[in-house]
Image (spheres, grey):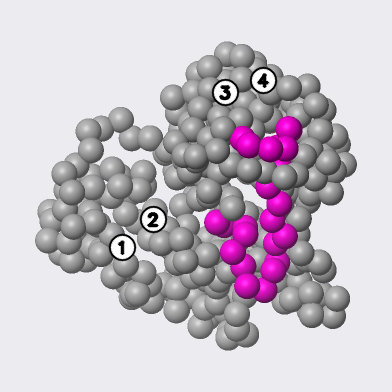
Amino acid sequence: MTAFRRPHRVAVLTLPGVLALDYGIPVQAFGTWHDDPYALTVCTDSPGPVPVEGGPALLIEHGLDMLERADTIVVPGLARPGSPPAPVLTALAAAAGRGARLVSICTGAFVLAAAGVLDGRRATTHWAYAARLAREYPAVTVEPRSLYVDQGSVLTSAGVAAGIDLCLHIIRTDLGAAAANQCARNMVAAPHRSGGQAQYIDRPALPARGGGLDEVRAWALGRLDEPLTVDHLARRASLSRRTLIRRFHEETGQPPMRWLLDARIDRARELLESCDVPMETVARLCGLGTTANLRTLFKRHLGVPPSAYRDTFQDAVTRTRSG
């Protein structure tokens, strides 16, 4: 996790033919904070009216010079992905060279790939374009099923709504789970879907049933400190165990107990960030049982033990307040 001494500068590189929703996601995620952890700018290669796929043209005032100062650059998807003009590629390569964080949503991955930013890295894009990305850029290891791929300074997401998951993941990394969850609530989005979840399940859509299993998941999130099982969830949903498992896969790309474990880990992160209660209390409140179990699962998911996570977060808060 990082903390900013000044607002973190985010530039949304909006090229002609940008997809309306792909553009709106980072603008909403990074541009609506009251305490200004992020400073958002929208730019393009040729300032002026920029055609939008699925919406009216945008009037964008800023050019590529904004990329020279950006800490994070987000490239939304394009309706007809291809290699953009040379100045765009040069600006992106220069930004990568100085250590800026580069992010793509959907077919924005083609822009990063054309700039050479994805060479030797894992990446994803909209499932319908994954084979083409792999074919046109063989130096990129394409993961066609992932919702998003985090390679540190370079992050890519699958199509449209997966951009929300990636932006929330970035906010979670930058500001912590509590901030990401608040942003998710504001956007009425799922608070956390791991990048490894499948972006596309090749099954026919189910008929609408009052929001699917949303109510059951909300019910479970309010009872993470209880010993929930698949049978508990099935009874709550008035479904058979088998149907509940199938519906969970169809709606989330995960089995129910994996989804529940991710929710428990996310709850543990919030507790570690926001209070100094003992580790055994954290383990109990998030439903992971014992301190040893919390330590093992937390480190497996995040790569650090919970004590180190808490220390890092508190140090970051101290630096921010003192800066």
Identify the disc placed on residue 148. Answer: none
CB under 8 Å between discs 1 and 2 = yes
Does residue 86 appear in the picture of this structure?
yes
Magenta span contains residue 225: no
| Kind of residue at badge 3 | Pro
Looking at the image, can residue 141 be seen?
no
Magenta stretch? 28-50
Q: CA distance from mark 4 to mark 1?
A: 42 Å
Residue found 57% across the figure and 57% down from its top: 29
Image position of 236 with respect to 202: above or below: below
| Crowd class of label 4 (few under 14; some 14 to 19; many from 20; radius 10 Å) | some
User: Is tag 2's residue or tag 3's residue first in the polypeptide sequence?
Assistant: 3
Q: What is the spatial separation of the Cα atoms under label 4 and label 3, in whole angstroms?
A: 7 Å
Identify residue type, mark 2: Trp
Determine contact: label 1, label 3, CB under 8 Å.
no
Labels 4 & 3 near each other (Cβ < 8 A): no
Q: Which residue is mark 4?
A: 83
Q: Is 274 or 76 nearer to us in this picture?
A: 76
* Amino acid type assigned to the residue bearing label 1 in the image: Arg
Instruction: Name the residue rendered at 16%, 44% in the picture.
Output: 207
- Quadrant for the N terminus in the image: bottom right
x and y percent of residue 48 in the render?
A: 68, 38
Task: Name the side, left or right, on which 97 lies relative to 312.
Answer: right
Dot label at residue 217: 1
Q: Disc 1 or disc 3, which is closer to the eye?
A: 3
The residue at which mark 3 appears reads as 81
According to the picture, the residue beneath numbered tag 2 turns out to be 259
Distance, label 2 to label 3, CA atoms, is 33 Å
